[in-house]
Image (tube, rainbow, N blue to C red):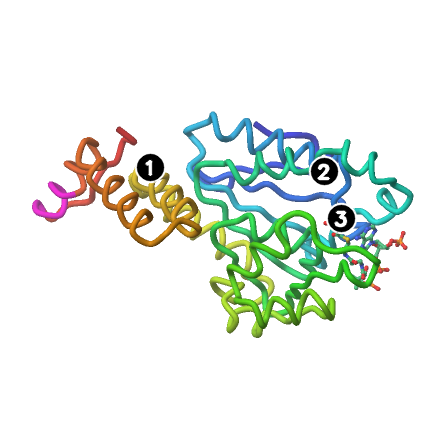
Amino acid sequence: MSVPDKSVIVEERPEEGVAVIRLNRPDVLNALNMEVRRALAERFTALADDPSVKAVVLAGSEKAFAAGADIAEMKDLGVVEQYQRHAERLWRAIAAYPRPVIAAVRGYALGGGCELAMHADIIIAGQGAQFGQPEIRVGIMPGAGGTQRLLRAVGKYKAMKMLLTGKPVGAEEALSMGLVSEMVEDDAVETTAIAMAKTIAGMPPIAVEQIKEVVLAGQDAPLDTALALERKAMQMLFASADQKEGMAAFVEKRRPAYKGE
Ligand code: CAA
């Protein structure tokens, strides 16, 4: 399904099984106002119920993936108004999307924009991309995972430096610290992300969903519990037709035809 171009997000279907969700407020560097957040939550919720989409690419525009929460919208809020926005419920819809999300980052991914990228499972960055949590410079701190997801991705000392100085890091540094999966030329970011999404869309869907679920659920569990979770999920996949098909195709030296069953 496509939404009109003037919308704050637009959706494209460049390949079978792949949806691109694009932030579409380039004039304000895709600053995340409540309208964008609601639109993102609505699309991710709808796509969760659409098994024809097997991977999502989350993209911005040339200059910015997203330069953070919309400061103009936020600057006069009081505590109660900030609380009542319940932005966490909108973020949760993105985090709960069960299939892989690939962030295609060109330009700025700052504040809420960096947090949005970190909701993805894979981050492809252009050489000119910049990642940062500059909230401290406008008197606040991250509120959508910028302290916790960043900590888990890059470790305490890199995270503290970024959070306490507000200084962004370039794509190369982000790659070396583990915040980026792959760095490519800026104009290859989206084609790379879409090609990767297409590859994933060709994989057995239940196995794909199980990998995502186990990685995310396991990362904060005790190792023994996480390993048990992994083992049970792997064993469960032996009940799927796709396991039989994948292994039969290997033995018969042909391409597997997965059905998501
Ligand atoms: N909110 C609202 N508008 C923003 C914005 C933001 N986060 N970031 C950029 N814009 C707007 C600018 O106001 C400007 O609009 P006008 O043309 O109407 O003046 C337009 O986008 C272009 O921006 P600049 O002229 O500033 O572009 P630049 O190339 O000179 O600088 C930048 C780019 C370094 C990213 C700079 O725009 C910037 O520092 N932006 C703010 C980054 C930031 O602090 N993000 C964190 C926000 S807080 C947050 O995210 C909190 C949270 O989740 C709880």
Give me the disc on residue 243: none
Residue 29 visible in the picture: yes
Quarter of image, res 73: top right
Name the amino acid type tagged 3.
Answer: Ala
Residue 17: x and y, percent? 42, 37
Which region shows up in magenta? 247-252
At 67% from the left and 52% from the top, the residue drawn is: 113
Task: Give the side of residue 226 with respect to residue 84, left or right.
Answer: left
Indicate yes or no whether the magenta region holds residue 16: no
Viewer-closest of 163 and 118: 163
Q: Pointer 3: what residue?
A: 69
**What crowding class fits label 2: few (fewer than 14 Cα within 10 Å), some (14-19), or many (20 or more)?**
many
Viewer-closest of 74 and 126: 74
Of mark 3 and mark 1, the one earlier in the sequence is 3
Residue contact at pointers 1 and 2, CB within 8 angstroms = no
Give me the disc on residue 205: 1
Name the amino acid type tagged 1.
Answer: Pro
Tag in front: 3 or 2? 3
> Does the beta carbon at disc 3 come under 8 Å from ligand 1?
yes
